[in-house]
């Protein structure tokens, strides 16, 4: 039985894309209605692995906060905060680093991906290398039952469980709770517009949500389809075709989607029409959120208040866990200042 969940998002790019939305934000927003306690946060300390420009970092953080709130995150129902406002995240990470081996850390995807891209191990920044430890701290502080994320985060939750297990074993107490990943089979990994890799900010294969309409249209129109189809009259493949994957996710007019699929299979519709319909469906789906975002942009005081209140609530829970950890491992002792 899941009663409490926690999840985060890194403000490493300027805005969310539909992969983030369907893989993470939408299920997270739905959980607000279903379970007692939902904690969602903006992982600004994690962003430092790639964003080290003050102005850009602030712009990214503001954008992600506005995106989340516009897409339905309700601060009355969820505890919504910024990671750096709760210093316990960094404090717990320092302790947890002692409960994972170098060998285990070297097997983590983010590190291995960099090596694959030709980066030398000696030049990889330690923030990136240590990322999974900070993420374990993010999670374990709140003792959640579940962590709703996309498939790419599964390995991070596994290492979080390993670290918690090791810590509990050493202190011979069940201080930390082992969390379960909550990952959707259908939308845990939304493919990018290149039709090959996961949709990702860093790969530039995204469809945005809040960008100007011309940009979104361009992203949709340049989307990869069936490479074997040369002419409109050639029968096309629907399964695995990213344009139809997006139609299934975005288009509320299921009759239209079925009709487009049938005509595509028979060679009776061109890619341009399929994409234009997708663009229209995108506008229909995200228009309310886009309107809400415009309003929120005018009320940054409200946004600041939401984050301040969220941090205060989060801190209470986080502080309690950190105290338990300090006590169990001996950092809190007879010499501690009260
Ligand atoms: P981030 O910011 O890369 O992504 C945020 C969320 O979006 C999901 N996601 C996707 N889901 C489906 N298809 C895709 N193409 C896709 N791209 C992204 C991610 O899986 C994620 O759920 N390390 C995390 C942030 C984080 C965190 C945490 C999450 C920091 N601490 C603690 C949970 C708990 C990250 O960088 O996500």
Image (cartoon, rainbow, N blue to C red):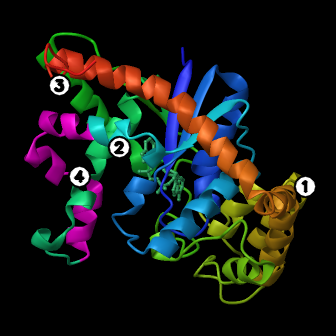
Can see residue 196?
Answer: no
Q: What residue did someone put label 1 on?
A: 255
Mark carried by residue 135: 2
Residue count near mark 4 (Cα–Cα under 10 Å), binned few <14, some 14–19, many ≥20: some
The image quadrant where one finds the C terminus is top left
Q: What residue did someone put label 4 on?
A: 130
- Asked if the beta carbon under badge 2 is closer than 8 A to the nearest atom of ligand 1, the reply is yes
Residue count near mark 3 (Cα–Cα under 10 Å), binned few <14, some 14–19, many ≥20: some
Q: What residue did someone put label 3 on?
A: 166
Pointer 4 and pointer 1: residues touching (CB < 8 Å)?
no
Q: CA distance from mark 4 to mark 3?
A: 17 Å
* Residue 106 within the magenta-colored segment of the rendering: yes
Percent from the top left, x then y, of residue 321?
Answer: 36, 22
The image quadrant where one finds the N terminus is top right
> Over which residues does the magenta segment extend?
93-117
| Left or right: 156 as drawn, with respect to 106 | right
- Nearest the eye: 72 or 196: 72
């Amino acid at each position: 039985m899941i009663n409490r969940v926690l999840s985060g998002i890194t403000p490493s790019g300027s805005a969310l894309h539909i992969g983030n939305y369907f893989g993470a934000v939408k299920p997270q927003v739905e959980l607000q209605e279903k379970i007692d306690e939902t904690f969602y946060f903006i992982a600004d300390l994690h962003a430092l692995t790639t964003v080290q420009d003050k102005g850009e970092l602030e712009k990214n953080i503001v954008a992600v906060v506005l995106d989340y709130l516009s897409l339905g995150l309700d601060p009355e129902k969820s505890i919504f905060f910024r990671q750096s406002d709760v210093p316990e995240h960094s404090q717990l990470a320092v302790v947890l680093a002692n409960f994972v081996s170098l060998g285990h850390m070297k097997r983590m995807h983010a590190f291995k991906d960099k090596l694959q891209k030709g980066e030398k191990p000696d030049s990889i920044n330690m923030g990136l290398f240590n990322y999974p430890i900070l993420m374990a701290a993010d999670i374990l502080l709140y003792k959640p039952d579940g962590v709703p994320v996309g498939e790419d985060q599964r390995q991070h939750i596994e290492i979080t469980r390993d670290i918690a297990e090791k810590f509990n074993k050493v202190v011979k107490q069940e201080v930390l709770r082992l969390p379960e990943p909550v990952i959707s089979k259908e939308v845990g990994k939304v493919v990018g517009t290149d039709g090959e890799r996961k949709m990702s900010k860093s790969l530039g294969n995204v469809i945005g949500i809040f960008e100007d309409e011309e940009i979104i249209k361009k992203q949709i129109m340049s989307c990869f389809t069936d490479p074997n189809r040369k002419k409109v009259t050639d029968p096309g493949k629907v399964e695995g075709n990213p344009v139809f994957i997006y139609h299934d996710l975005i288009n509320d007019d299921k009759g239209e989607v079925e009709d487009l699929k049938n005509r595509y299979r028979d060679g009776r519709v061109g890619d341009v029409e399929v994409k234009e319909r997708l663009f229209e469906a995108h506008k229909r789906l995200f228009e309310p959120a886009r309107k809400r975002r415009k309003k929120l942009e005018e009320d940054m005081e409200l946004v600041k208040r939401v984050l301040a209140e969220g941090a205060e609530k989060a801190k209470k829970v986080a502080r309690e866990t950190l105290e338990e950890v300090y006590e169990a491992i001996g950092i809190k002792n007879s010499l501690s200042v009260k």
